[in-house]
Amino acid sequence: MPDYVEIQVTIALLDGHVTGVQTSWIRPPERLAEVLREAALEVERG
């Protein structure tokens, strides 16, 4: 198992407008859940 993962997340929100968020990370696999939480917070902040 690799000691890193690279993920790319693209999110579009439809609420009268479209917001696109595209980010990539390279981090240890065990931090994947934390990375996804960070992405969700980033989207909430806009």
Image (cartoon, rainbow, N blue to C red):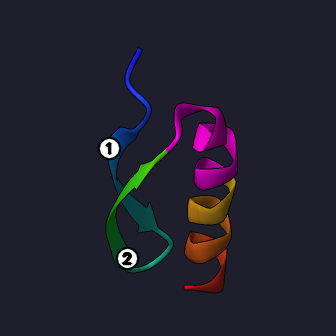
User: Magenta stretch containing residue 31, yes or no?
Assistant: yes
Kindly identify the residue that appears in the image at 32 percent across and 71 percent down: 20
Q: In the image as oriented, which residue stretches furthest toward the top? A: 1
Q: Quadrant for the C terminus, please.
A: bottom right
Majority secondary structure of the magenta segment? Answer: helix
Secondary structure at badge 1 equals: strand
Mark 2 closeness class: few <14, some 14–19, many ≥20 residues within 10 Å? few
> In the picture provided, is 19 more to the left or to the right than 38?
left
Q: Position of residue 33 (x, y in %)?
A: 67, 40
Secondary structure at badge 2 equals: strand
Between marks 1 and 2, how big is the CA–CA gap?
23 Å
Q: Quadrant for the N terminus, please.
A: top left
Mark 1 residue type: Glu
Q: In the image as oriented, which residue stretches furthest toward the bottom? A: 46
Q: Position of residue 11 (x, y in %)?
A: 39, 58
The front one of 12 and 41 is: 41
Kindly identify the residue that appears in the image at 64 percent across and 33 percent down: 30
- The region drawn magenta spans 28-36
* Circle on res. 19: 2
Mark 2 residue type: Thr
Kindly identify the residue that appears in the image at 50 percent across and 72 percent down: 15
The front one of 41 and 16 is: 41
* Circle on res. 6: 1
**Toward which corner of the image does residue 16 lie, by quadrant?**
bottom left
